[in-house]
Amino acid sequence: MKLHEYQSKNIFSKYGIPIPKGRVTTTAQEAKQIAEELGGLVVIKSQVLVGGRGKAGGVKLAKDPNEAEQLATQILGMEIKGLPVRKVLVDEASAIDQEIYFAITDDRASKKPIMIASAAGGVDIEEVAAKTPEKIVKVNIDPLLGLREYQARDIAVAIDLPRDYWRDFTKIAMGLWEVYKNTDASLAEINPLVITKDKKLIALDGKMMIDDNALFRHPDLAEMRDTDEDAPAEIEARKYGLSFIKLDGNIGCMVNGAGLAMTSMDVIKLFGGDPANFLDVGGGAGAEKVAAAMRIILTDPNVKAVLFNIFGGITRCDEVAKGILVAMDEVKPKVPMVVRLVGTNAEEGRRLLENANMITAETLADAAKKAVAAAKG
């Protein structure tokens, strides 16, 4: 789950990371009031969950409250990369002397969190990594020991940060580690962390991504979710506890188990097809959950066939079959269905489906071939 800039920075501030004075608003009139409170010179920043806001015209400097109102009116009427701007952050403008990239994220290779810093802040870190990778400093963090102060100082030295800022930088680094750890984040990013003309370090922009699987521990963060960037099908799937990701293909997939789902998608590709989604109904899925999953798949007009690949362990195959039949009765699909059931009560499940004239298969390869042929036919 992604958080907006204003949400991320509010969390940062709770952990002692300095941020600019400012507030978020949904109206241009209030933007003017906030600008008056902050002394007039402010930055109006669109709050949408995409990159490139500045290049798209979603970040503007206002010299006085009246201009702040005008710019907020313009920005609140925008769409950036297909997402409507519903809120703007009005921040006190900062006189910038230097910009630094600073973040903590997951490092799958080392199986540890990794702190990343670069003196080339304020731009896409991917661009820096591609063109000047030597400018990026990386330090792995032992999750049992946490971030050590000497590691933060090592980073400060490596990015040529003047010694006068080491103490403040270390405090920000330790705060960012606490943010990352305590929110179950997969990314806590400051870009840029700036040195201002009056010799202060400030987190000018912030970005956070929270592990969806940990949100049950953070109901306060779960409430911050912005569904504008989510496909309607993904929102619906979340209600039923389904893991669903929409893709661009034309073969709908419903599978129990993330690994089996990815394998099913690979096998579909192997035989010349394109998956329309990733959908894991999980273990113990009953008829109601399966029916919901099928309805979600069939909301995609690109779907020309549906492949069900169910391994019956905790999930009983006959329950899945009943769910499929319930969904068929409700949705009345006009696309062919290919079902592979293996495991607990598989024979009973297959019998139920065969009686409904559905296409069945014994192996995944056979099921994938039939689904690809059905989608093309």
Image: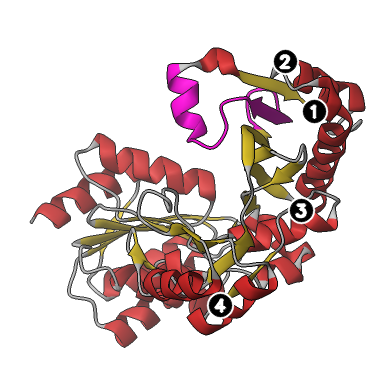
374 left or right, relative to 128: left
Q: CA distance from mark 3 to mark 2?
A: 24 Å
Tell me the residue that label 4 is attached to. 32
Q: Secondary structure at mark 2?
A: helix
- Which of the two discs, 3 and 2, labels the residue nearer the N terminus? 3
Snapshot colouring:
secondary structure
Of marks 2 and 1, the one in the foreground: 2
141 left or right, relative to 343: right
Q: Given the image, on which type of amino acid does mark 1 rest?
A: Ile
Tell me the residue that label 3 is attached to. 12
- Which of the two discs, 1 and 3, labels the residue nearer the N terminus? 3
Q: CA distance from mark 1 to mark 3?
A: 19 Å
> Which residues lie in the magenta part?
107-131
**Are the residues tagged 4 and 3 within 8 Å (C-beta)?**
no
Tell me the residue that label 2 is attached to. 158
Front-most of 46 and 316?
Answer: 46
Q: CA distance from mark 4 to mark 3?
A: 25 Å
Q: CA distance from mark 2 to mark 1?
A: 16 Å
